[in-house]
Each structure stands twice: as structure tokens, then as C-alpha cells.
Amino acid sequence: MVEAARRRSADLGLTNVEYRVMDAERVDLPDGSVDGVICFSVFASAERNPWAAMPARVLIEGAT
């Protein structure tokens, strides 16, 4: 996603944009230092991120 955003801003001729990959819960930037933030959620496999898989697991188990 970050690379796609970089390519798109290059297509638009934007030069005042900075891209960083970081945890959205722990934004490592000084207060008031940004104009905007875009968060693309990316989840790991169900084994590494069980809370994201729980709703589907409950539905599947309930249907059997």
C-alpha cells in the first residue's frame, strides 16, 4: 500500500508527502507535526491475529 501511495503521489507530482509504516496505536511523531494520517489495516494469519478470526470461527462452529 505504501509503495502504491508513493507511485500515485509521483504521478500527481506531489513532493511534500512523507510515507512511514508504523503501528497506528503508537504513532511515533511529535504532536501537531502532521496534517493527516491514513491507516490501511493489514492483518496477519489467524494464528497470529486470533481476534480478527474469531467472528468467522464462531459463525462456522455455530453452523455445524
Image (tube, rainbow, N blue to C red):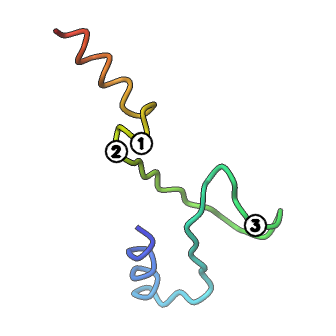
**Pointer 3 or 2: first along the chain:** 3
- As helix, strand or loop, the secondary structure at mark 1 comes to loop
Q: Which residue is mark 3?
A: 29
Residue nearest the viewer, comparing 44 with 16: 44
Q: Are marks 1 and 2 in contact (CB under 8 Å)?
A: yes
Q: Are marks 3 and 1 in contact (CB under 8 Å)?
A: no
* Residue 60 pos. (x, y %): 23, 18
Q: Which residue is mark 1?
A: 48
* Residue 22 pos. (x, y %): 59, 62
Q: CA distance from mark 1 to mark 2?
A: 5 Å
Under mark 2, the amino acid is: Ser
Taking the image as shown, residue 35 lies to the left or right of residue 8, namely: right
| Marks 3, 1: nearer the viewer | 1
- The disc label shown at residue 45, or none: 2
Residue at x 47% of width, y 56% of height? 40
Residue at x 69% of width, y 59% of height? 27
- As helix, strand or loop, the secondary structure at mark 3 comes to loop
In this rendering, the answer to whether 23 lies above or below 45 is below
Taking the image as shown, residue 40 lies to the left or right of residue 56, namely: right
Residue at x 56% of width, y 75% of height? 19
**Pointer 3 or 1: first along the chain:** 3
| Marks 3, 2: nearer the viewer | 2
Q: Quadrant of residue 34?
A: bottom right
Residue nearest the viewer, comparing 34 with 3: 3
* Residue 38 pos. (x, y %): 55, 60
- As helix, strand or loop, the secondary structure at mark 2 comes to loop
